[in-house]
Amino acid sequence: MKYFYLNIFLITILIFIFTNTDYSNVFSSSISTKIAFPTMIPTPTPTIALPVRLIVQKLSINTLIEPVSVDVNNIVEVPDDWDKAGWYSKAVKPGEAGTAVIVGHYDNQLGDPAIFYYLNQLEKGDKIMVLTGDNKELYFIVKQKATLPYWSSIDDLMSTDKNRNLILVTCAGWWNQALQSYSERLVVSAVRDN
């Protein structure tokens, strides 16, 4: 007990000393040393502008592209204009990693050729060009074509690879009057060339 008050006194002195002492220069030396830490500057992700025009010289296609979505039955819409192409806006833009989808009519209500009527004439190695809103030309090389049943989901068309893919889709097969649809879908797959 005789040291109790002495200990209290010493603790009080120590608290007073530590709370009233400026320690800001304790770790500094007479030689000024600056350590440079690298500044982390985020690398911007390059963005690609919206597609505005589709050009396929082999088929004499040079048409405007408008964004389209899906209807109430989850079927990809096509433009109202028979001579325009539609970019499926729920997928990536042409030129981005993933699969971009451009759709177009095969024929019009009279059975006359529409914008993608001759799409089946594309072969492996043929070129497709998409012009973007900032005037960049994106080139794609056809790698294959296939036909799928008309009920195929848009998800069935998406590639799982990391390439910058483009697919062109139109109707094919025979006209089913009861369904008011063609029996198949023609899918031309291409990969970015530049």
Image (tube, rainbow, N blue to C red):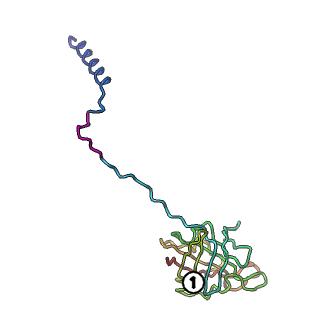
Furthest residue to the right?
110
Report whether 34 appears left or right of 165: left
Q: Nearer the viewer, residue 151 or 22?
A: 22
Circle 1 is placed at which residue position?
Answer: 145
Q: Which residues are magenta?
A: 26-34
29 within the magenta span: yes
Which corner quadrant holds the N terminus? top left
In the rendering, at what x and y percent does residue 41 appear? 42, 55
Q: Nearer the viewer, residue 87 or 64?
A: 64
Q: Residue at x 34, y 50 (%)?
A: 37
Report whether 178 appears left or right of 167: right
Furthest residue to the front?
31
Residue flagged by tag 1: what amino acid is it?
Lys
117 within the magenta span: no
As drawn, 77 above or below 142:
above
Picture quadrant where residue 76 is located: bottom right
